[in-house]
């Protein structure tokens, strides 16, 4: 009577195929698909690509680290791992022998092998393999812009290759001057980057903010100009009465501005309708700012900036003294405190917004790491533990300080909501010259400018209605 083992031996070829049956019998020492891939492997980039596609037909691959070491540079050279067991690989490299190591990444997956694994779209597989091949090409940072490939299409006469790190594309509108045609910007030339600012990266600006506790006004102006091409959003706070400007990087989310007009209502005697009186308006700016650090000195700066934000909600540092009487006859003396008033900047969205901190909260996510910088666990090392990311939620009440101007007999507010001045406001003209305020009759009360007035007859229930303005 046959056993299960006998049935397995008879059917394993049908179950696993001939090559895998050999691998099972040899307990993994003999792997025909891998052997075929090693035979097809080559130190030549083109030869390796072709061999990889051939090896994929039998399901083999040669992408182990030991498969990248060859005995020479020739097209027919083979890797040292060919016909070697894991134990034999330990002694596969001989002393005083030169070897060639491929620096390129492993070749992309075989088209045939991918289709055999169940791919439904052969064209898509070929496209993905082509993309993987491009990824495997040995491009380095600061390589060419690909000018040789695009030069014939754009017709740009380049006398030499230019590196992206030192040059950039300059765009012009090819449809300029053509009416009713949308703008179309194309590359017109390759310009050299300005060594003063354009060669700096976004990280340069970010690292500068993280490492600076405060800036003077002139220094801030110079740095904003220096990092102008990095598109770095800066958030700055400045206490009223102090010179220091505290910079934060632009990790800002949830910006919202609430505008709340204030009204109350009342009814005139005999009227079922409500009338409304406008009492004013106020604005509140809310946003969340995330603070983080990458280095130990940046951590110390972040701690100081967090304490600075907390101080904005506390009284101003300078305490005022109130005295009564003269110096020779001083009756009493006491101390008084004043609030901190703040000037805020958020990129170019809000410029020099003046107000005070209404709400302030700090939160640390549970998944945030608390690293220290004592890498070698030294007893005298710095084991300070502090969260690497702190979220700060800020609510700021804006103090309005708009000016007025009079022109052609009309006095108007000059609103400046975001610090851009008159350029940020739509200019409007009045339909008529405003009236001069007159003494009101005890029985004639104006409700709102430009609305009808109620006369004493109306208050007594008469149908007469005074429509004079």
Image (cartoon, helix red, strand yellow):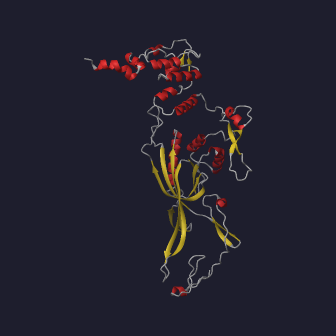
Comparing 322 with 326, the one in front is: 322
Task: Tell me if I can see residue 94 in this picture.
Answer: yes
Residue 6 picture quarter: top left
Q: Which quadrant holds the N terminus?
A: top left
Residue under the image location 47 percent in, 27 percent down? 116
Seen in the image, is 93 located left or right of residue 245? left
Residue under the image location 58 percent in, 40 percent down? 203
Q: How many marks?
A: 0
Seen in the image, is 222 located left or right of residue 159? left
Q: Is residue 259 above or below residue 279?
A: above
Residue 133 picture quarter: top right
Q: Is residue 447 above or below residue 387?
A: below
Q: Which quadrant holds the C terminus?
A: bottom right
Image coordinates of residue 453 in percent, x first then y, are: 57, 81
Image coordinates of residue 287 in percent, x first then y, are: 52, 54
Image coordinates of residue 448 in percent, x first then y, are: 57, 76
Image coordinates of residue 246 in percent, x first then y, are: 57, 50
Task: Tell me if I can see residue 109 in this picture.
Answer: no
Residue 26 picture quarter: top left
Comparing 25 with 390, the one in front is: 25
The residue furthest left is 1
């Amino acid at each position: 009577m046959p056993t299960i083992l006998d049935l397995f031996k008879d059917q394993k070829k049908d179950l696993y195929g001939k090559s895998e049956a050999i691998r099972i019998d040899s307990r993994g020492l003999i792997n025909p698909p891998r052997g075929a891939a090693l035979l097809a492997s080559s130190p030549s980039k083109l030869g390796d690509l072709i061999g990889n596609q051939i090896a994929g037909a039998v399901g083999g691959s040669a992408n182990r680290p030991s498969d990248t070491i060859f005995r020479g540079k020739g097209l027919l050279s083979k890797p040292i791992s060919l016909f070697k067991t894991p134990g034999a690989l330990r002694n596969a490299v001989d002393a005083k022998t030169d070897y060639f190591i491929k620096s390129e990444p492993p070749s992309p997956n075989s088209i045939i092998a991918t289709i055999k694994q169940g791919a439904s779209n052969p064209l898509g597989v070929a496209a993905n393999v082509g993309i993987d091949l491009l990824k495997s090409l040995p491009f380095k940072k600061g390589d060419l812009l690909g000018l040789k490939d695009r030069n014939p299409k754009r017709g740009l006469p380049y006398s030499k290759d230019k590196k992206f790190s030192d040059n950039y594309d300059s765009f012009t509108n090819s449809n300029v001057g053509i009416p009713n045609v949308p703008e179309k910007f194309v590359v017109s030339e390759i310009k050299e980057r300005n060594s003063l600012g354009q060669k700096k990266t976004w990280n340069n600006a970010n690292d500068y903010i993280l490492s600076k506790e405060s800036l003077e006004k002139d220094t801030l102006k110079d740095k904003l100009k220096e990092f102008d091409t990095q598109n770095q959003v800066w958030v700055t706070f400045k206490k009223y009465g102090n010179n220091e400007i505290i910079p934060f990087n632009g990790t800002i989310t949830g910006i919202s501005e609430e505008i709340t007009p204030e009204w109350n209502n009342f009814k005139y005697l005999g009227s079922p309708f409500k009338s409304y009186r406008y009492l004013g308006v106020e604005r509140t700016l809310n946003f969340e700012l995330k603070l983080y650090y990458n280095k130990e000195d940046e951590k110390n700066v972040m701690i100081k900036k967090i304490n600075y934000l907390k101080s904005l909600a506390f009284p101003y540092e300078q305490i005022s003294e109130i005295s009564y009487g003269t110096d020779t006859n001083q009756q009493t003396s006491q101390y008084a405190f004043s609030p901190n008033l703040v000037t805020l900047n958020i990129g170019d969205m809000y410029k020099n917004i003046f107000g005070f901190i209404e709400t302030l909260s700090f939160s640390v996510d549970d998944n945030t790491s608390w690293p220290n910088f004592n890498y070698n666990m030294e007893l005298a090392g710095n084991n300070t533990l502090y969260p690497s990311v702190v979220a700060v939620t800020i609510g700021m009440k804006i103090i309005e300080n708009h000016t007025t101007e009079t022109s052609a007999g009309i006095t108007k507010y000059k609103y400046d909501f975001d610090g851009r001045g008159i350029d940020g406001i739509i200019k409007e003209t009045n339909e008529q010259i405003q009236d001069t305020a007159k003494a009101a009759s005890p029985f004639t009360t104006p409700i709102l400018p430009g609305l009808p007035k109620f006369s004493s007859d109306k208050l007594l229930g008469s149908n007469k209605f005074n429509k004079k303005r």
